[in-house]
Amino acid sequence: MPTDLRICGLMLAYFHAEMTLACLKTLQHQGIETLILVDNSADATEHQRTQALAQHFPTGWLQVVIAPENLGFAKGMNLAWQHAQTLGQWDYALILNNDITAQPQLLATLCTYMAEHPRTALLGVAADTGTAIQSGLHYQRWTGLMFPTAVMGSFQVATGYCLLLRPQAIQGELFDPRYFMYGEDVELSWRLREQGWNVEILAQPLLTHTPAQSSREGSLFYEYHINRGHWLLVASLAQTPLEKALMYTCRILVLSMRATLRSVRTTSLNPLKALVFSKHQTINP
């Protein structure tokens, strides 16, 4: 990897300072000039733990930004990106979850690919979850269903746990701030695609990833934001009023089936409650 590349890292922390430190140590020597860590915890004690992480690294390498409240993923990453822009221009930005463990060749492999593919604006990578290989997904825009391979009406999504971004492709904010969590990576992938850029995934697993560390999968909070993301995506992806109506209709059917099945599987009403709350607050605020 060329040593003159300017690469910034963007990461969020929501508690779990020890996990964040373990993640950062796997990134320290990969060629990142500065890593900007936004603490979304909204907790004074946790802020101190996060700020103390900087002492483990060379001066200036880790820059901690304290969010005024839990901003969610999209606004939190936008805050990190705004801070990065005050430090000059970057060749690439590496967007990361704090629950990954990177292999030593992660960044070099991503940068090499980007250099060879100048029309690629967003590059994701496969991850080893311990039980399976997690890779990019294809979002079917009519139903909101995700598929491991392309199907009719779908498009490639680079999921947000690790993304290498070409900054010149971003006009305005990095992520759509309407999304609190879930769906923002789908919207970004669609937006870049519509602007003529490529969104791609490296099939080689170059990191491990333990998903849903902060969102408590199955909780009302988790289920609400999963559903809310799907409703918001209708507004982002629909190109005509007719498309919007059809997308809402399809999602009512699909999300109702999903919520019913998840309620049965988890023996909890949270998925059904979340579906009703999210639909009312997102479509009819």
Image (cartoon, helix red, strand yellow):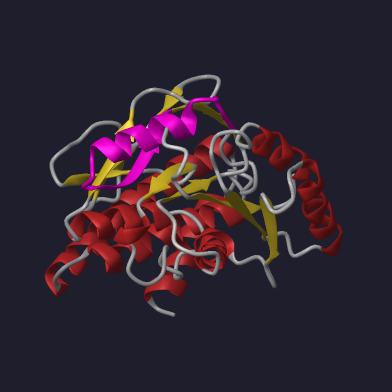
Q: Nearer the viewer, residue 4 or 149?
A: 4
On the image, which quarter does residue 18 sit in? top right
Which quadrant holds the N terminus?
Answer: top left
**Whole-percent x and y of residue 3?**
47, 38
Q: Residue 11 vs residue 107: left or right?
A: right
Furthest toward the bottom, the residue is: 285
Seen at 55% across and 43% down, the residue is 32
Residue 147 visible here: no
Seen at 56% across and 37% down, the residue is 211
**Whole-percent x and y of residue 43?**
80, 62
Furthest toward the top, the residue is: 131
* Number of dots carrying numbers: 0
Residue 95 visible here: yes
Q: Is residue 106 magenta?
A: yes
**Whole-percent x and y of residue 225?**
50, 58
Q: Is residue 167 magenta?
A: no
Q: Is residue 258 above or below residue 281?
A: above
Q: Is residue 6 above or below residue 44?
A: above
Seen at 31% across and 49% down, the residue is 254
Q: Nearer the viewer, residue 231 or 197?
A: 197
Q: Residue 153 vs residue 260: left or right?
A: left
Q: Residue 169 vs residue 258: left or right?
A: left
Q: Nearer the viewer, residue 201 or 60?
A: 60
| Magenta residue span | 101-126
**Whole-percent x and y of residue 63?**
68, 57
Which quadrant holds the C terminus?
Answer: bottom left
Q: Residue 24 vs residue 32: left or right?
A: right
Seen at 16% across and 68% down, the residue is 239
Q: Is residue 204 above or below residue 8?
A: above
